[in-house]
Structure formats: C-alpha cells, structure tokens
Image (tube, grey):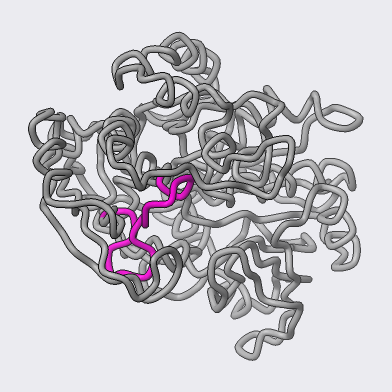
Amino acid sequence: MAGKPSRRSLMAGGTAAALAAPLLSGRAAAESPGRGDGRGAGRVTPGADVAAAEGWRVLRDRKVGVLSNPTGVLRDARHVVDSMAEHEELRIVGVFGPEHGFRGSAQAGESEPEFEDPRTGLTVYDAYGADARKMTALFRKAGVDTVVFDIQDVGVRYYTYIWTMYHAMAAARDIGASFLVLDRPNPLGRRADGPLLTPAFASGVGLKPIIQQHGMTVGELARYFNGELLPKEGDGGKVELEVVRVRGWSPRTTAQHTGLPWVPPSPNMPTPDTATVYAGTGYFEGTNLSEGRGTTQPFQFVGAPFLDHHYSDRLNALRLPGVRFREGYFVPTFSKHQGRTCAGVQLLVTDPVRYEAVPTAVAMLREAMKYDGFAWRKDPDPQRPFWIDKLSGSPRLREMLDAGRSPEEVTGAWRAEVRDFERTRRPYLLYR
C-alpha cells in the first residue's frame, strides 16, 4: 500500500525501535520463559504499548479504523484510541464497537448505537452482531484502508470477540484493506481443551471449527484464521495481516502474574479469576442453574434453588486437580433465579497450572444432573433446541451426559480432536 512505512523502518533506530521489534516479520523472536508455577519472568508489554512507544508510526499515512472496547488500554490506563487521537499526523476515520460497546456501556447481548465519541469527536459505529457483509459496509462508510483490532480475549471459543475479529478480517480482505492486531496475552495460556465445533452448530458463540479452549492469543488466532479459514470464506484469499507482538510474555504466565491492569472485557468478566474458570463454567449458561450472573463473582458461583450442601461435598470428593469447592449461597440480582436464594458452590482455583477448566465443568454438570430440578436450557432455534449444544459445538456433550456416561468418557471423546488442533495451530504460534 502506497505510503505505508516498511517493517524494516519500524525496527530501525535506538531504544524506541527495540520496543517495536515484536512487529511480526515472519520469524518469531525468542520469548523469555515463564516459571513453571505460572508466574511471569520480567515485564510484559502488550502490542499496543509497543506501537505507542513508536508514536504509532505503524499507522502513519493510513486511514485507520479501530475495532476495540474498554480493554484496549495502555499501561497508563489510557485507551489506545485516546492515545492515537492525540497524534495529529494520524488519520483515524472511525471506531467500531463490538458487544457491550466501545466504551463498555452495554450489558450482555447489547451494544452502543452509532454516536460521536465526546472525548475524541470520532464516529463510533455499532459492529455488534455484524457479519462480514455488514462489516464491509461499515468499513466502506468510514473509508478505512487499515483495520486495527485491540481487544482482550479470554481464550474461549464461545466468547464473541474473536468472531467479531473474524468477520472484520473477512471484510478488510474484501475491500482490500490491511488488518493489524495489537496482541495481548491469553489469560489461560497455551492449554488447548474441549470439543471441536461442528459446522452444523455454528452460531454467534462459535462460528468456525476450533477447539473450545484454543490456547492462542488473538494475534495467533488471526494468523490461524488467515491461514486455515479465510481462504475458504466467500471468494477466498487472505487479508494483508500484521501482528504487533507482546514482549516478555510466556504462555505459562497467568493473567494474575503479567503485572498488567485487568480491565473487564465484558460486565460479567470482572477479574482474571473469572477468566480462569469461564472456559468451563460457561457451560452452565446452557442449563437452568445460575452461572453467577447477578453476583459479584459470575462464573465462580454456580447454583440453583434446588441444590443443597451435598453438591460441594460430592465435588470435593472427586479430588479434581487444582480446585476446591466452597459451599456457597447467593441471590442473583438479575438473570436466572433473580431474587431467589441459590445453593451451590464457589470455585476456588488452588493451582492454575494443574486446574483443568473444561473437565472440571463436565464433572460439575454430571453431579448437578443428579438433582431432580436440573434441566438443559431451551433455545428458540427449532432445529437446535438446546443452548448447551451451541456452547459445546455439537449435541455430543449433552447426549453423553444424558446417557449416563462418566466425565472421563465425555472428555475422552474429544481427545483426538484436541491433538489434531494442536498440530494444525503450531505454525501460527508466536510465543514459546
């Protein structure tokens, strides 16, 4: 693209250029290893801070559209869009807000309508629920030639931001725009687990066949999408993709030990501890149990009015690795069982390295099903009437549990899928 600074030029110079070095150039630089206990080894610098240290030189001479939400912050807590807007030489032509909105004012399943951002004066477009076709129209309306993506993901297929990114990549490809990811750590690290989505159960909470806990950063996922999935989308082909890499991060480093501020990616993801369990307890959205929405610890509290103290006893008796279950009672202020006292458990992760979110949730489901009040949450989709099937990617999880299969049998059913996915993703990984 005419006028675009070369990657070589971005790496020239002194200290500031050293910060820019993680801009993807085909070969991955060595990463400092994390300790085996999940703690980091040195300062973690997100891709946004790497680019900002260069005065956003990577975006000069471009018509930039930014797809972001409140998590797109620098270490000093300023939003990347606010930082970009301070540079008069940059041309920011639009901002695009996903689910919950650019500034984060909307709840689950909601968005912010198109508005003029009072801080920057930039037009903010509503991109929630936009497929590639609608995203293409939004990008053309704004006049972008470069799309910047900066959103903190939580490493789970049914968290919608990665599919917003996928649609945005397809749209950028279709209008001939480039796509730039400001990468951030995956709070769950490298572990891959859970079932593979089947195409018949594609939805907004799982668009393409990837593993439930994918174990990749959004930058790595973008590379995977570009290499494995986009060529099969629409008229085919890839988008011109760049990734500004995280510095100093190892996939062994948990979110609690990066030293980075945690900005909730959505209203019910308030802490890194929430993200740690969400890859599993998100399943309870597909049941009539409360997954803790309407409490101060969503997805860490799970319960229902028909459970009792035996639920925690039975779960602790399983001696699941890296977790204990505290008998807990809570009254949701909204969502399922609003205003009613729920008995259940609080998940206490004692060892995040040993903890296995998906197998733990399967065991929790199996024990909950022993109560007469348990039911799968119905979905208005007549062809796919159970929400759990969309979350898990197929009817297999539900059908195996309904048939009385053990948690070990259920999780064993997708072991080969996980191995195959790990092999396929390998060329797209950026961090050791």
Residue 36 point in image, percent of width and height: 15, 30
Q: Position of 249 compared to 264: left or right?
A: left
Residue 224 point in image, percent of width and height: 61, 28
What's the residue at 13%, 28% (across, down)? 318
Q: Is residue 148 magenta?
A: no
In depth, the one of 262 and 304 nearer the eye is 304
In depth, the one of 73 and 115 nearer the eye is 115
What's the residue at 68%, 36% (across, down)? 384
Q: Is residue 285 magenta?
A: yes
Q: Which residues are magenta?
A: 284-300
What's the residue at 19%, 54% (across, down)? 346
Q: Residue furthest bottom?
A: 118
Residue 116 point in image, percent of width and height: 73, 85
Q: Main secondary structure of the magenta part?
A: loop
Residue 94 point in image, percent of width and height: 75, 71
The image quarter containing residue 81 is: bottom right
Which quadrant: the C terminus?
Answer: top left
Tally of numbered tags: 0
Q: Compared to 147, does 247 lie above or below?
A: above
The image quarter containing residue 241 is: top right
The answer to whether one can see residue 392 in this image is yes
In depth, the one of 252 and 153 nearer the eye is 153
Q: Residue furthest front?
A: 372
The answer to whether one can see residue 12 in this image is no
Q: Position of 166 compared to 284: left or right?
A: right
In depth, the one of 58 and 104 nearer the eye is 104
What's the residue at 24%, 51% (across, down)? 307
Q: Position of 314 compared to 391: left or right?
A: left
Q: Compared to 414, does 428 lie above or below?
A: below
